[in-house]
Image (cartoon, helix red, strand yellow):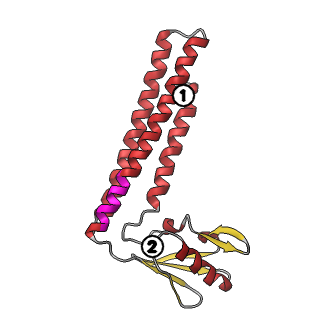
Amino acid sequence: MDERLTKFETKMQKSLDNLAGEYAAIRAGRANPHILDRVKVDYYGTPTPVAQVGNIAIPEARIITITPWDKGMVKEVIKAIEMSDIGINPGSDGSTIRLVFPELSEERRKELSKDVKKKAEECKVAIRNIRRDGNDEIKKLSKGEDISEDSVKDLQDQLQKVTDDYIKKVDEAASVKEKEIMTV
């Protein structure tokens, strides 16, 4: 691949990575510690990810336990989880916090499935915008440099192939997440 196209491929990969992060935050009825990735705890005045203030474990398929290393942080962690948008009420025995994931209803599964499709479409749009920016830059090259029309066409074809690959990866990621959500 032409080195002039690598920056566009890098941007497309970042879009795909962002989608993967968003999918990790969608709960599918099973306990997934990534749902806590965006939850920040006020750790002595500094917003800190939950994973950095305690031990996160999954003792059962639908339960996450968080054991803060500093027992004084239990209330702060509970407050941070309640303030977040994960939609689960934490329970505590004073030293360990338990998050119990309820079984998803069919209606909620369908809503989440639509959300997965929407996020996939947004990612595809971002990838296509990157392709458009790449094509614009390639057209500028043809005007500014001594580059043949064939070379311009080759660059555009290579960029289109990269775009098609990333669109396919987005579809695969969406399909996997949708299957995970719809599995009872």
Q: Position of residue 81 (x, y in %)?
A: 54, 75
Q: Main secondary structure of the magenta part?
A: helix
- Horizontal arrangement in the rendering, residue 100 relative to residue 45 (left or right): left
Task: Count up the numbered dots.
Answer: 2
- The answer to whether 21 is drawn above or below residue 2 in the figure is below
- The answer to whether 184 is drawn above or below residue 127 in the figure is below
Question: Quadrant where the C terminus lies?
Answer: bottom left
At 57% from the left and 17% from the top, the residue drawn is 141
Q: Secondary structure at mark 1?
A: helix
Q: Position of residue 95 (x, y in %)?
A: 59, 88
At 40% from the left and 36% from the top, the residue drawn is 165
Q: Secondary structure at mark 2?
A: loop
Whether the magenta-drawn stretch holds residue 110 is answered as yes
Residue 78 sits in which quadrant? bottom right
Residue 63 sits in which quadrant? bottom left
Q: Position of residue 108 (x, y in %)?
A: 31, 67
- The answer to whether 37 is drawn above or below residue 144 in the figure is below
Judge by depth and name the residue closer to the eye, 42 or 100: 42
Which residue has dot 2 on it?
87
Dot 1 or dot 2, earlier in sequence:
1
Type of the residue with mark 2: Gly
Whether the magenta-drawn stretch holds residue 52 is answered as no
Type of the residue with mark 1: Leu
Which mark lies nearer to you, 1 or 2? 2
Q: Which residues are magenta?
A: 108-117
Q: Position of residue 128 (x, y in %)?
A: 44, 35
